Image: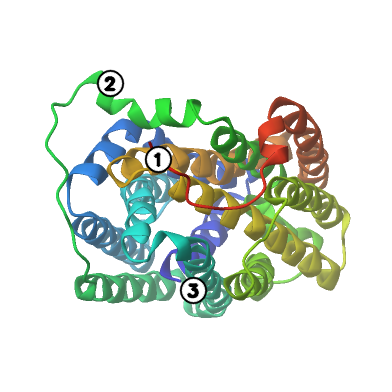
């Protein structure tokens, strides 16, 4: 919730300072670059140390970053360069935090319950994503510093909750650090075409179809709303995702999982086109909700497939690779949206992205037939 509130405040403040679509895209790039630079170190550390301690340290860095933004806003020395620098630090912390959290989840539930656990975890996350942008948009009326201080308090609360988390941690056997161990996560994914297809499909679909970075432009210039409208637009996708996650937590996916994933990514592309062309707030809100709902199905399938197919000793490294793919689709996708909008305008940029997503679906169905045929999410038998 704190991270989503911070994203709303940063996006609105950057656009207030610069009125530049490109700068909105650069915010996404600043978040993404650390995950690439730290890729090999992140997975290796997550597989060798207690994952709870890693996540607590990362959230502690986010507390400090939020306080720096608050201080800069209060004292008037905040600038786009300062924001980009702080966002880069937050991106570095989340580069460790996200894959470590993903690798931690399977240690908390039996393997047979993992798909439901992923959906339940997504329900909690999406609830926060709904509340965060909406609250952040309204709190911003008191100034960006008010939002950043609130974010710091929420991050501190997360540290307390992580401290209370208990599970049996068995340290893995110490093996020497070599190029083979560092690149093991990449090699593991390359050897599993279904996993590679699912991860790369999500990467290119969301990279092209994501419109999150341009929401400040839509809220201010196209739909003619204020910060409250931006908060609601950012929450719309999460509302659709939450409804889907609640359903999947009670009714896990049955057969034809691969075809379901392709169908939902195609729906995501169509909804993106509708959002791009809409000039009515309610229609835009509905299109974003459909995008969130269809993307959630893809998220649950990809996350469950990834965790069920990966041994625990490898989960940190595999999750780190997956995290880079997610970051490329989200943060780097925001940069792509900003650049495309600077060239062609916001509306053509979103529509082009939606069409690109549909093209990716068609190409990926030919490149990864094993994913098209993939039936059920089950724990694979190990030799």
Crowdedness near tag 1: few (<14), some (14–19) or many (≥20) residues, C-alpha within 10 Å: few
Crowdedness near tag 3: few (<14), some (14–19) or many (≥20) residues, C-alpha within 10 Å: some
Please indicate whether residue 347 sits to the left or right of residue 132 in the image. right
Against 171, is 38 above or below? above
Rendering coords of residue 107 (x, y %): 31, 60
How many angstroms separate mark 3 from mark 1 (CA)? 32 Å
Asked whether residue 259 is in view, the answer is yes
Q: Nearer the viewer, mark 2 or mark 1?
A: 1
Which of the marked residues, 2 or 1, is nearer the chain's N terminus? Answer: 2
SS for callout 1: loop
Asked whether residue 32 is in view, the answer is no
Against 114, is 340 above or below? above
SS for callout 3: helix
Q: How is the image coloured?
A: rainbow
Determine contact: label 3, label 2, CB under 8 Å: no
How many angstroms separate mark 3 from mark 2 (CA)? 36 Å
The answer to which of 210 and 88 lies nearer the viewer is 210
- Residue drawn at 74 percent across, 45 percent down: 262
- Residue drawn at 30 percent across, 39 percent down: 43
Residue for badge 1: 382
Q: Nearer the viewer, mark 3 or mark 2?
A: 2
Residue for badge 3: 124
Against 326, is 74 above or below? below
- Residue drawn at 28 percent across, 61 percent down: 59
Rendering coords of residue 211 (x, y %): 69, 51
Label number found at residue 68? none
């Amino acid at each position: 919730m704190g991270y989503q509130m911070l994203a709303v405040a940063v996006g609105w403040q950057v656009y207030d300072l610069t009125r530049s679509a490109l700068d909105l895209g650069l915010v996404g790039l600043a978040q993404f670059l650390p995950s690439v630079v730290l890729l090999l170190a992140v997975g290796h550390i997550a597989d060798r140390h207690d994952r709870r301690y890693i996540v607590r340290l990362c959230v502690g860095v986010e507390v400090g970053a939020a306080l720096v933004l608050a201080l800069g806003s209060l004292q008037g020395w905040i600038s786009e360069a300062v924001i980009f620098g702080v966002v880069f630090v937050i991106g570095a912390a989340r580069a460790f935090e996200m894959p470590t959290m993903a690798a931690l989840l399977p240690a908390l539930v039996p393997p047979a319950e993992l798909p439901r656990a992923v959906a339940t975890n997504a329900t909690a996350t999406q609830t926060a994503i709904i509340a965060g942008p909406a609250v952040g948009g309204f709190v911003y009326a008191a100034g960006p510093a008010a939002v950043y201080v609130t974010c710091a308090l929420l991050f501190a609360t997360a540290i307390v909750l992580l401290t209370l988390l208990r599970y049996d941690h068995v340290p893995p056997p110490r093996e020497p650090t070599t190029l083979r161990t560092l690149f093991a996560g990449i090699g593991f994914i390359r050897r599993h075409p279904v996993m590679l297809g699912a991860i790369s499909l999500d990467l290119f679909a969301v990279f092209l179809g994501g419109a999150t970075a341009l929401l400040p432009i839509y809220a201010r210039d196209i739909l003619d709303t204020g910060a409250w409208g931006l908060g609601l637009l950012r929450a719309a996708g999460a509302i659709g995702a939450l409804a889907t996650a609640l359903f999947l937590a009670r009714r896990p996916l049955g057969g034809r999982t691969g075809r379901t994933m392709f169908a939902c990514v195609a729906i995501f592309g169509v909804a993106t086109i509708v959002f791009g062309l809409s000039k009515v707030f309610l229609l835009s809100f509905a299109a974003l909700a459909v995008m969130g709902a269809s993307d959630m199905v893809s998220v649950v399938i990809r996350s469950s497939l990834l965790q069920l197919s990966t041994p625990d000793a490898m989960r940190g490294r595999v999750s780190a690779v997956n995290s880079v793919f997610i970051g490329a689709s989200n943060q780097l996708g925001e940069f792509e949206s900003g650049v495309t909008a600077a060239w062609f305008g916001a509306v053509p940029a979103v529509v082009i992205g939606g069409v690109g997503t549909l093209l990716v679906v068609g190409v990926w169905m030919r490149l990864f037939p094993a994913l098209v045929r993939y039936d059920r999410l089950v724990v694979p038998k190990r030799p």
